[in-house]
Each structure stands twice: as C-alpha cells, then as structure tokens.
Image (spheres, helix red, strand yellow):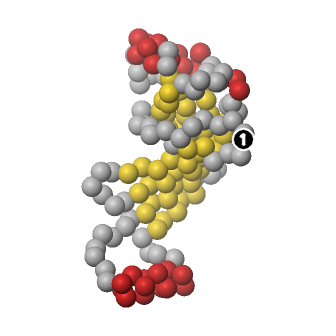
Amino acid sequence: MYSTSNDVLKLPTHIVHTLKVDDNGYLWFIVPKPTQQIAAFESKFPVELQYFKKGSPDVINVHGAAQIVTDEAIIAAIDFMSEERKAELLVNHIFLNVKMMQVELNELEVERKTFWQSLKQSVLELIAPPSHHQTYDLSV
C-alpha cells in the first residue's frame, strides 16, 4: 500500500495483507502505527495497492480512497476479528479501509523472447495497448 497524495506528511509504504473485503466493497487491513500523531495525517487520502501471487506473473492494481479508522464505534463494529485481537493490534497498529475506485488486472505472459521479438513487441505496444491489460472502473 502506498499513498498517492501530495501531502507533505503521508503514511509510509507498507506491505499489507487484506483482512477482509466487506459487502460495501471496502478493503480492510492494518498498518504499523506511525511515530507521528495520527491527527497529523489526513484522514482520507488516495492510495494504490498492488496484489501479487508468488510464482504467478499476474498483478492486480487497486486504486482507491483510504481512510484511517479511528472512530471507536466503527472499530467496535468490526465483526471479522475478536475484541481481544482488536485491542492487541491497536497498541501498535491502525486500521485502514479502502474504497476501491479502479481495479486493473495485468495478465502477463512469461516466455523467453529474443532481442528482435522483444523489440517488435515494444513497437507494437506503442501502437496498440496490450490485450492482457484490463481496467475496471468501480466509481459510483
């Protein structure tokens, strides 16, 4: 996860594991609590997430709007984790949720190509976008 905002102070880039995708299309995860006060950060900011699967060349890019969840009522309503686990995590972590706005699926082919094949493919991709790239707009 990395913030794409232009703010002077933004959350650092982190490797995250998605805890849940809720019924409203929000991705939930935690990141280590920054050394600065949470109030110093914008509560909502644009982010990009890149999902990889080990051994697979495919990549999913998610662009969306992240929100730092500090409201105790919202945290208490999280139903995919026990109260004890939430309290334990909140000591050193913060919850984030991301509203997905755009999802891109890149299905990459893994094959050995000669220099000339690579050059030909590069020139062709300048003319027409590759067929393995799909973009889905999820904005309402």
Given residues 13 and 84, the one toward you in this image is: 13
Image side of residue 23 versus residue 73, left or right: left
**x and y, in percent, of residue 84 in the image:** 41, 11
Rendered residue at 40%/16% (across/down): 85
Given residues 62 and 9, the one toward you in this image is: 9
Image side of residue 31 versus residue 55, left or right: right
- Please determine whether, in this image, residue 49 is positioned above or below residue 29: below
Rendered residue at 45%/19% (across/down): 89
Rendered residue at 55%/44% (across/down): 2
Count the numbered circles shown.
1
**x and y, in percent, of residue 118 in the image:** 39, 82
Q: Is residue 60 visible?
A: yes
Q: Which residue is mark 1?
A: 7
The amino acid type of the residue labelled 1 equals: Asp
Image side of residue 114 versus residue 133, left or right: left
Image side of residue 126 versus residue 42, left or right: left
**x and y, in percent, of residue 13 in the image:** 53, 41
Rendered residue at 54%/24% (across/down): 33
**x and y, in percent, of residue 3 in the image:** 60, 43
- The image quarter in which residue 15 lies: top left
Query: Few, some or many C-alpha atoms within 10 Å of disc 1 (few <14, some 14-19, many ≥20)?
Result: few
Q: Is residue 25 visible?
A: no
